[in-house]
Image (tube, rainbow, N blue to C red):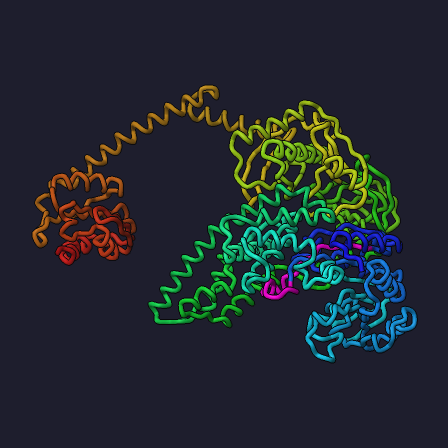
Amino acid sequence: MQVYGVNELRKMFLEFFESKGHLVLNSFPLIPHNDNSLLLINSGMAPLKPYFTGQEIPPRKRVATCQKCIRTGDIENVGKTARHGTFFEMLGNFSFGDYFKHEAIAWSWEFLTEVVGLDKNRLYPSVYENDDEAFEIWNKEIGIAPERIYRMGKADNFWEHGAGPCGPCSEIYYDRGEKYGCGKEDCEVGCDCDRFIEIWNNVFTQFNGDGNGNYTELDSKNIDTGMGLERLATVVQDVSSIFDVDTMKAIRDKVCQIAKTTYQSDPKKDISIRLITDHIRSVTFMASDGIIPSNEGRGYVFRRLLRRAARHGRLLGIEGRFLAELSKVVIDESKDGYPELEEKKEYILKLLTLEEDKFNKTIDQGLTILTEMEKELENKKETVLSGENAFKLYDTYGFPIDLTKEILEEKGFSIDEQGFKEAMEVQRVTARSARGTTNYMGAEETVYQQIDPGITSKFVGYEYTSYQSVITVLTTETELTEELVAGQKGTVLVEETPFYATSGGQAADTGYILTKDAEFEVEDTIKLQGGKIGHVGTVTKGILKVKDSVELKVDASKRNATAKNHSATHLLQKALRTVLGTHVEQAGSLVTDERLRFDFTHFSALTVEELKKVEQLVNEQISNSLPVNTKIMSLEDAKKEGAMALFGEKYANDVRVVTMGDFSKELCGGTHVNNTGVITVFKILSETGIAAGVRRIEALTGNSVLAYYSELENELNSAAKAAKTEPSSLTNKIEALLDEIKALKSENEKLKSKLANNSLGDVMNQVVDVKGMKLLAVKVPDVDMNELRNLGDQLKEKLGEGVIVLASSTAPDKVNLLAMTTDGAMKQGAHAGNLIKELAALVGGGGGGRPNMAQAGGKNAAGIDTAIEKAKEVLSTQIK
């Protein structure tokens, strides 16, 4: 048998099914689209669910993909075994109501035996125990002896996910030979050892299950095939595990090189080597799809995987950062199948470096916290760390439970593992709740799911803002209807529409849909499944009926203002990449008729100078009046020409490319100006951080900028009028007023100090002796803390060596306390901080400070006299 690499096997599979009439689709991003049941794509069929349910019509009835997937259900076992991983590639061929069992089984056998060249005698199919049809195909059509076909129960060979489409499976197992076996004479398919490995799973989706064990035949039956690419490579390359196949071995070897160790020389180190090898693949692919580390959702998965890898690097003795270096190997090994890795390389490496730096700081903080927890256990004479504290280390500082356990065991402590599991479960439940609906489709059922999937809408808004069309569907807020009457809210679908539906960050068009006798106000325009466009709003006059001919009128002035802002975001993105670097990627946007908001990847706040350069560069391109052109081309050609694509976006084979002179080129489905000169002017309002590594710029264009400056001018004139000067002289006037205020404030402070001294009178006769030390404790009327300190300094000079305590009230619920000690007093034990702490309690407050000076506040002025009297007693306990 010829040995093939992972990249070769991927190509062979896709080309084979392309030859069988399948449309080969690129992998969908890891971020699910309109599916709240998943945090991350975890199977080849997950992004195709709308096609299986019939809610959307697939681009072709036969499809093949190689889908990047992440599963974290067995994360605690990753590294500990050689079979568990979080990232994998799933090969799949799919039929949506086209071919079924005969073709699926025949092609799986043909690919494995004739294309890949696996030994037929080592392949063993399995079928669902009641699926006689599949058994007959394997036996009579493929020619497999009955004793080599295994019938298995529902748990093994029947696929279902709650209520919804489901059906029996037929898997293919490969016998890897006795060297991988358990040594038992009766070892066969189904044994738990590594000898017989499942490499192909044909899922025959032929039923609809109600979730209670009742099944009905589907009118349109489907095929969903899954085959792990890494697992196939393990068989073809005849290696022990997925960590030994060519692409993963390259990463594994790099880990060993950085750690200066050898794989399979130390079982403990092997765990860390495997874990890092797996996790670096996951985080590299997650970063390439625009997922950002955070403390929730898929961002939490990213952070957790990265921190586990970083921590295991420390266990291997790796010093400093190393994950970005490993990520380069992942990119090199997988860029053939996933060119976005190379395209986003600079960004990926920067993001991983930033997050690793954060963890290196955090883990040291965590170790300090753990040390404090250990001391607390010692003080309480306890030996078990609470599950709550163990989870805090895990959740806040990225300490996996095994790390905390390992550190504690060295010092004779253990962990309440049950308490930890309970805290973990609370988090899981919270995460599930935050995710919302978990039905099969992962989205709430709405009236729109009732629309015939064959109905579509054509957008004609690039050329028109007014258009004649025919109503195809009407809905109320809850059901399909044949007519909508005045006052009713609903949704209108037509054959062709000039209304732009919210997408790509651009806000929807609004306007009107008219007949001779009826009027419908379009308040929102939305994209629906299957290429439909819904006009949401209210009938303001008459009756609208299905099949009515209508005139659709977009609010043209609003559309034009939105187009200016949208075109400006393209100029802004290129300006940011020019000024800051090519790691800048769009991470979100909002374009309305009033303003634009642009989110982008960058790892620090922009300086005033950088913002000025960006704004200037955008305005230069506006003044250059660059022609704005659009062109439909293949995705591959667009990328070759350097067109910018959005993070995590799944593009069709043909894409719309928007160019602005030689300055900007992006894939975009939005509406734009014909020439950048139409934008007129661009003004940045703000630049802020919204997440780790993500910044946000808000800006204005055109008339909005003029309105902004007009408002500023009005405010300037109002300010000048209030200052009794002209706008041109306002700065000088403000500076003069500030100098005047400063002088008056200084004079006021002197007067207040003089008044405080005068009101106090000669208090030196109130000095008392406390064990040979002078104490002056007095009440001062209506003095703030600042003046109290000034007064204290003056009295300390008069007193010489000793202690001063001052108390004042500026309101019944506002008390200020001050204590001062001289150097000589401190040598004898006087401590201002401890003294003030006890006195503050008597005025309903708290405070403290240094041995030589302390202050406090309180809310009970009635307690001042008691506090003054108490000073003598407290001081006497301090003096040695």
Q: Assess whether residue 525 is covered by the magenta stretch.
A: no
Residue plotted at (84% across, 58% down):
115
Q: Quadrant of residue 133?
A: bottom right
**Up/down of 69 relative to 633, above or below:** below
- Lateral position of residue 723 relative to residue 106, left or right: left
**Up/down of 45 relative to 495, above or below:** below
Query: Bounds of the magenta span?
Result: 64-84
Residue 86 drawn at (x, y percent): 64, 59
Q: Nearer the viewer, residue 613 or 368?
A: 368
- Lateral position of residue 516 relative to residue 745, left or right: right
- Lateral position of residue 81 relative to residue 665, left or right: left
Pick the quarter of the image with the N terminus. Answer: bottom right
Residue 218 makes an appearance in the image: yes
**Up/down of 117 relative to 626, above or below:** below
Residue plotted at (63% across, 26% down):
619
Residue 482 makes an appearance in the image: no
Q: Nearer the viewer, residue 407 or 543?
A: 407
Q: Assess whether residue 67 is covered by the magenta stretch.
A: yes
Q: Nearer the viewer, residue 670 or 289?
A: 289
Residue plotted at (35% across, 71% down):
381
Q: Nearer the viewer, residue 49 or 107?
A: 107
Residue 51 drawn at (x, y percent): 81, 57
Residue 507 drawn at (x, y percent): 69, 42
Pick the quarter of the image with the C terminus. Answer: bottom left
- Lateral position of residue 357 relative to residue 655, left or right: left
The total of numbered circles placed on residues is 0
Residue 537 drawn at (x, y percent): 74, 48
In the picture as drawn, the residue positioned furthest to the right comes out as 140
